[in-house]
Each structure stands twice: as C-alpha cells, then as structure tokens.
Image (cartoon, rainbow, N blue to C red):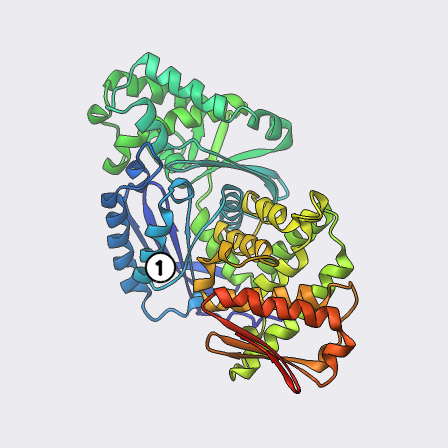
Amino acid sequence: MTTPMLDGTLLAAVDLGSNSFRLEVGRYAFGHIERVQYFKEMVRQGAGLDEAGNLSVESMQRGWDCLARFAERLKGFPPAQVRAVATQTLREAKNRDIFIQQANQILGYPISVISGPEEARLIYQGAAHSLPPSDERRLVVDIGGRSTELILGQRFLTERVASYPVGSVAWSLRYFPNGEFTKASLRTAHIAAQAVMEEAALHFAPNSWDMAYGTSGTANAIADVLAAYGGEPDVVRREQLYWLCEQLLAAGNAANVRLDGLKEERRAVIGGGVTALCAIFDLLQIDELRIASGALRQGLLRDMVQHEEYSDIRNRTINTLMERYHVDGTQAARVQQTAAILFEQAKRYTGVTDPAQLKSPMLDWASQLHEMGCLISHNDYHHHGAYVLSHSDVPGFTQTELSHLAALVLAQRGKLRKVEDFLQNPEFALELLCLRLATVLCHARRDPELEQLNLRDKPEKWSLKAQAGWSEQFPQSAYLLGEEVLAWQKTPYVFQFKQAGNIQAK
C-alpha cells in the first residue's frame, strides 16, 4: 500500500523533446497539481541527428548545458518526486547512451527513454486531466519535433495509442531544408505525412471519437496564429489551416514569415508542423481541433501522484504478455516468489530494513516473463523472450525498463558475458543472480524448500548457504548450483555455494 501524497508536495517533470527541453514544477493540493514554475529552452536536439543516426557533439552539449540549469532548480528534490523522460530524438539516436550517461550525472536524476506508445499514454493523461469531466470519446493529437502521437480515450482511460515518425522539426528539415515554401514542397510534405500515417485512417476513424483535441507546441502555435487573425481562441478549423498554408506560400521562405502570434522560435519549423497537421485533418476527416492545455509533462506529474494506478498499468501489461505468450502461470509465480525471497535475504544481510528496498519490481516482472519465449522455442526461449521485450511497445514501461527486463530474461541461463554492460550495475547483478538461482531451484517445477537455504550479500561477493544434507537430498539442484558458481567466475562478482563440510567457490 502506498502512502497518500501530502498536500503541498512539490513534483517536477523533465521532458527532453526533439525541439525543446522543458521543466515543470507543480504542487500537489487537494487532488490537483498546480503549476509553480515552468522552464523551456529551445535545444533543437532533433536537428542534430546526422544521416547515420548519431547526435552531433554540439547538439549533445546544448542538451547538457540546459540540463545543468534545470539541475540547479531541482536541487534538493527527493528522487521519488522527479521524473525525467526523453522522446523521439533519443529513441532514434544510435549514440544516445553517451548522451544519457552524462545527462544523468548532470541532472542528478535518471532519465528514461520512453517508447512512442508510452509517450502517447502519458500525453493523454495530461490532456484528460486538463479538460472538464466528460463521457465524450476523445481523439488527442500531439505533433512534436520528430514524432506525432494519436490517442483515443474516454475519461482517463486510453483505448488506442499510436506513434508516427512525423514531426515539425523532422518534416521541416526534410522538405523545407532551406526554409523555402513552394506549392510543390508543401504538397510533397503533406502527401508524405499522409503516407507515413496512412493506417491511422483505420484505427482512428471519425466514428470512433466525438471530439478532437490538440496538445503541445505545434497545435498551440497554430492556434495562437489563427486567434491573432480573428479565429476562436484555442480552436483550429480546417479552412483556417488551408489559409495558413497560403500565408506560408506567399512568404516564400520561413525567414520571411511574419505572422502575428507566431513566436520567433517557431518560425523555422512552422512549415513541417502545418503540413503534418493538414495531413491529419485530411486523413481523419477532422473539421475542428480544440486545444487541451495538458500534455506529456502533466501526464508525468499525474503518474507520480497515482503510484498505485501506475503500478496497476504495468502489472496489467505483464499479465497481458503472460496470456499472449501462454506462460505457465504456476511456474512463473513459483520462480517469482523464490527470486523475491532470495533477494530479500541478500538485502537484509547488508542491513537494509526499508520494505521498499527489500523488493525489486523488475525482478518480479522478469520472473513472471522468464518463459515467455517458450511459445517460440523451448531451447532458446531466453533469447526469444528477450527479443520480444526489446522490440515491444507496452503500456507503462519505458524503453530503459524494457531493456532492463530483456537483459534479465536473456541472461537467466547460459553465459553472462552477453549482459556484461548491465553487470556494471550491482543492483542488476543481484537481481540476475536471484533470477538464475530461482530457475535452478525450481527446475523440477516444484516449490523448493527454501527454509534450508539462505543467500548472503557482501560487496561483489555472494554466498548461498545450505543446511547439512541438502545436496544429498537435492543432487540435481546441487549440481546446477555448482555450475552457477563456475558461470560467475568470468565476471567481477564471486558466487559461492556452501553446505556444512563442503564449499564450491571461485
């Protein structure tokens, strides 16, 4: 059971977008989150991706410099009250680990790279909480710098999410590289966006929603311009969009665009944003789009308030995966319970007493999913399970968390060098040890007699102690534990299996 959040608690959300980095600080009060401060910097990291998919040193440095300024404001915030995420640009960047590693140190809080669907889920949460209560079926459109998210939902529940690699920065760079607007370039950008998002016409058909809402930079920027020329505030209509296209064409170049309500920072990417939104209007037959003030950052803040709900989302996701891949639920529960007991034993041995630190949700989930690859192959199920997790977009999980889960599932058996990068993290190493030991002790698909075993944890050295006679009672398990001792010899860690009168060690 989680502790209810106290009124007055400060929360912070950091959004590393393709066009800008943003920090929002909110105060929780009476079930709502009130904005305290908001910071935004145009980092334009998405423009720093080269043809090989690598971020330039300059774009990374701009990001690090911005995060250093954010870190000053966040100093003193408890880790549980800060959530930082990165979106499409860092999803694409092949050298993202270099940026993230340094960014984590600078910001002082972990940054998660979230999947497109997870980004869409969070956007919907932010939008839904900013709108009046209603039973209407909502379509939410969010055009970012390098991706567009579409979400169907009702009240606070999402029904369908999708993410497409179409955005204001990406489309402007690709179709208006010199800022030039012509009939041909505008038409090409429009058609290309429709082609990429073509399937949206089936999944987000007009009869599946009652009202369409736009969130974030592109929709807000367009609505501001239209309002400056007599349009209804916070509304974008189809005929107004085409009027805006004509204004771009008349200007001839982004540098020449002079529109009331358009911020200077938006001028360079307005062409990509407008053509992307026109494509969505045509594909989904939208006549009117209303602006919702909440989006990704507000969704992150809500997730921190709703710990139990957030946990439920991830648990539902795990259950769905287990059902989809026909996982043996009894064995999964057996391995999960065994791994959890061993993990708690090891933690208590180091003096940990905090209940939250005695548990590892990642270990629990990996234990539940460790046999998900058996549907594909009984010999290489760990490889297949890890592949599925690495290439899945599942609600509630960031890409960082999915990589963590996939690495645990992959290394549950066999050699450990395949996850040597992950083993640099002692917490991951302990989780992996507990998972491997649990699969060994449950190999006969019976509940192991754990009262005869105890796992002890010292820095980079673990020992599993068994009561006298245990090896004679469970010879196959003892043999497998001996093999486990050998497996860890090629790592920075030491694992020993001890029994009265007998020690197998490095």
> What x and y, as percent, mark residue 24?
37, 56
* Callout 1 secondary element: helix
Residue 426 percent coordinates (x, y):
47, 68
Q: Is residue 40 visible?
A: yes
Q: Residue at x 54, y 52 (%)?
A: 402
Looking at the image, residue 379 sits to the left or right of residue 388; the answer is right
Q: Residues within 10 Å of mark 1 (few under 14, many from 20)?
A: some
Q: Position of residue 390 (x, y in %)?
A: 54, 46
Q: Residue at x 30, y 49 (%)?
A: 40
In the figure, residue 363 lies in which quadrant? bottom right
The image quarter containing residue 35 is bottom left
Residue at 46 percent of width and 64 percent of height: 28
Vertical position of residue 80 compared to residue 317: above or below: below
Specify the farthest residue to the left: 256
Residue in the picture at 78% in, 77% down: 473
Q: Residue furthest top?
A: 184
Q: Amino acid at mark 1?
A: Asn
Vertical comparison of 102 with 91: above or below: below
Quadrant of the rendering where the N terminus is positioned: bottom right
**Which residue is at the front of the view, 154 or 164?**
164
- Give whichever of 443, 231 is nearer the camera: 443
Count of numbered marks: 1
Q: Nearer the viewer, residue 71 or 350?
A: 350
Would you say residue 155 is visible in this rendering? no
Image x and y of residue 436, in percent: 62, 64
Position of 408 with respect to 77 (left or right) is right
Q: Is residue 489 above or below residue 142?
A: below
Residue linked to disc 1: 104
Towards the viewer: 412 or 140: 412
